[in-house]
Image (spheres, rainbow, N blue to C red):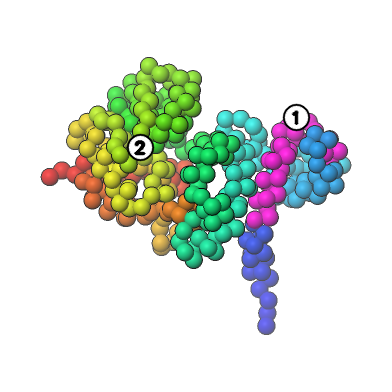
Amino acid sequence: MTVDVQATRDVVDIITGGWRAQALYTAVKLGLPDHIEAGRDTDAELSKATGANEQGIHRLMRLLVAMGIFEGSESTGYRGTRLSAALLEGPQSLSAMCLLYGEEFYSAWGHAHHAISTESSGFEAAYGRSFYEYLSRDAATARRFQLTMNAASMFFHQVPEVFDFSGKKVVDVGGGGGHLLATILGATPDARGTLFDREHMMPKAREHLSATVGLDRTELVGGDMFQGVPAGGDVYLLCRVLGGHDDDAVVGVFEHCRRAMADSSSRLLILDRFVEDENSTVLPALWDLHLLVTTGGEHRSVDRITRLLNRAGLEMAGTAELPMETTALIAAPRTP
């Protein structure tokens, strides 16, 4: 029997993917990208700066260089790459994502068999409470989660390019820290905005909106989107907030948005990843499974979202593609 060497190598690469992720997590936990950026480019210097064993650092750096996270060697000095640059501390850093995925989410994925077999949260199996309940009790993890969401917002700048917000009152439902709303208002000087989210999000949102577009163009409203949304909007945004909730709850949110719309020209924008059962690419399928493991939730197909919109008295009016396999769905009130 002939051994398919390439197939073996491909399987091994997949199997060891978790090891690579944990090596990157460890590098971020130790602050290696920032230390190397600051000129600490030898094992000894990195060991002294981090308090980690020098030989352990050497072995970790050997792998990270092979992975392309860094360049160089102990003899020539380590240097950063475009990958390590994405991990440097700063507003768009992926470091918080590495920490969250390397700790809480890594533990949750250790219960993937349970999550898939029972279609329930692996996070809850690992921690004894739901992901969102855990966030409400652990401020540090909640902060990492918010930073992760912010860092994953690289498609925000293109949203004003696929929809005309000129002169509109924009209501960002579940708007989090205000990054999407600030991006839209920054690109559309004559638009106004309302950020709607739970009360605990208001301080961070107010801080960000004040520092970016100013509070004279924005209103912050605390509340629960499952109970209702602010009235009178020309555009309602739902960005990455539906995946953890069942169909009936999602229809309820759609109904709240439709009833709150200023008039028949108002629109609902849904920004999310959507799965396809035929010819699926990896990222949406992977994130769908991640939702199951972490919250017990799921990503939906465009067809399924369309059916839910119809139940709520809305209909599809257009779509637009955004980076990172994100799609903008534009829905309008259904005419009689």
- Taking the spot 77% from the left edge, 46% from the top edge, the residue there is 61
Query: Which residue occupies the extreme bottom position in the image?
Result: 1
**Label 2 SS:** loop
- Taking the spot 49% from the left edge, 20% from the top edge, the residue there is 211
Q: Where is residue 169 in the image (x, y as percent from the top left)?
A: 30, 27
Quarter of the picture containing the C terminus is top left
Q: Position of residue 46 (x, y in %)?
A: 81, 37
Name the image quarter holding residue 160: top left
User: What residue does disc 1 label?
Assistant: 38
Quarter of the picture containing the N terminus is bottom right
| Label ID, residue 224 | 2
Query: Can residue 144 be seen in this snapshot?
Result: no
Q: In this view, does 136 lie to the left or right of 305?
A: right
* Residue closest to the eye, 84 or 147: 147
Q: Judge whether residue 22 is colored magenta.
A: yes
Amino acid type assigned to the residue bearing label 2 in the image:
Asp
| Label ID, residue 309 | none
Mark sitting earlier along the chain (2/1): 1
Compared with 201, 210 (above or below) is: above
Give the magenta part as a residue range: 18-47
Q: Judge whether residue 268 is colored magenta.
A: no
Tell me how far mark 2 sits from mark 1, CA to CA: 44 Å
| Main secondary structure type of the part rendered in magenta | helix
Q: How crowded is mark 1: few (under 14 residues within 10 Å), some or many (20 or more)?
A: few
Amino acid type assigned to the residue bearing label 1 in the image:
Ala
